[in-house]
Image: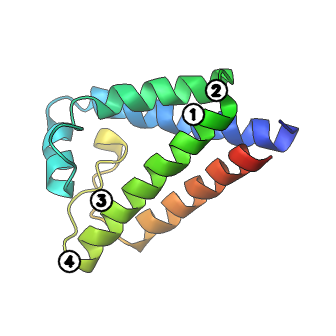
Amino acid sequence: MSAVGLVASILLGLVFLVSGGSKLAAGPGWPEQARGLGAPPFIVPVLPWFEIVLGAVLVMQLVPTLAAAVALLVLAGFTVLILRRLAEGQRPPCACFGAWSTKPLGRGHVVRNLGFIGLAVVALLA
């Protein structure tokens, strides 16, 4: 992996670590927001832990190509969920970063996720 790929992977890992950690820190409010966003109920309790593990794997470079591919798929899924809510005219709180992201969904969330997807692509291909 190139230095650029390594940096992209570590940055992406940090995003997932912060995202998962902030969801856990938000306490019982986050699961409620996630359900409002349309997250499948079976995913809500495990998502923060999954994000933390994925972030750690990315930062530690355990299986960098696989981790980057999983991150890309997860981010694509999140982005589709956001786009679906926006297309339905719904603007629930993002809940992407727990209590830190209580703004209603908007185009900025899509743009941010596209940036994270770009990082995942660089981590995967570099």
Q: Is residue 98 placed above or below 77 in the rendered structure? A: above
Residue 33: x percent and y percent?
Answer: 18, 48
Badge 3: residue crowd in 10 Å (few <14, some 14–19, many ≥20)? some
Which one is closest to the eye, mark 4 or mark 1?
Answer: 4
Nearer to us in this view, 72 or 33? 72
Residue 21: x percent and y percent?
Answer: 39, 28
Badge 2: residue crowd in 10 Å (few <14, some 14–19, many ≥20)? many
Q: Is residue 47 left or right of residue 12?
A: left
Q: Which residue is mark 3?
A: 103
Q: Are marks 4 and 2 in contact (CB under 8 Å)?
A: no
Q: Which residue is mark 1?
A: 14
Of the numbered discs 2 and 1, the one sitting upstream in the chain is 1
Q: Is residue 33 placed above or below 86 in the rendered structure? A: above
Q: Which residue is mark 4?
A: 88
- Assign the N terminus to one quadrant of the image: top right
Of the numbered discs 3 and 4, the one sitting upstream in the chain is 4
Farthest-out residue, right: 2
Three-letter amino acid code of the residue under disc 2: Val
Three-letter amino acid code of the residue under disc 3: Lys
Residue 40: x percent and y percent?
Answer: 19, 47
Marks 2 and 3, Cα distance to the nearest angstrom?
Answer: 28 Å
Marks 4 and 1, Cα distance to the nearest angstrom?
Answer: 31 Å
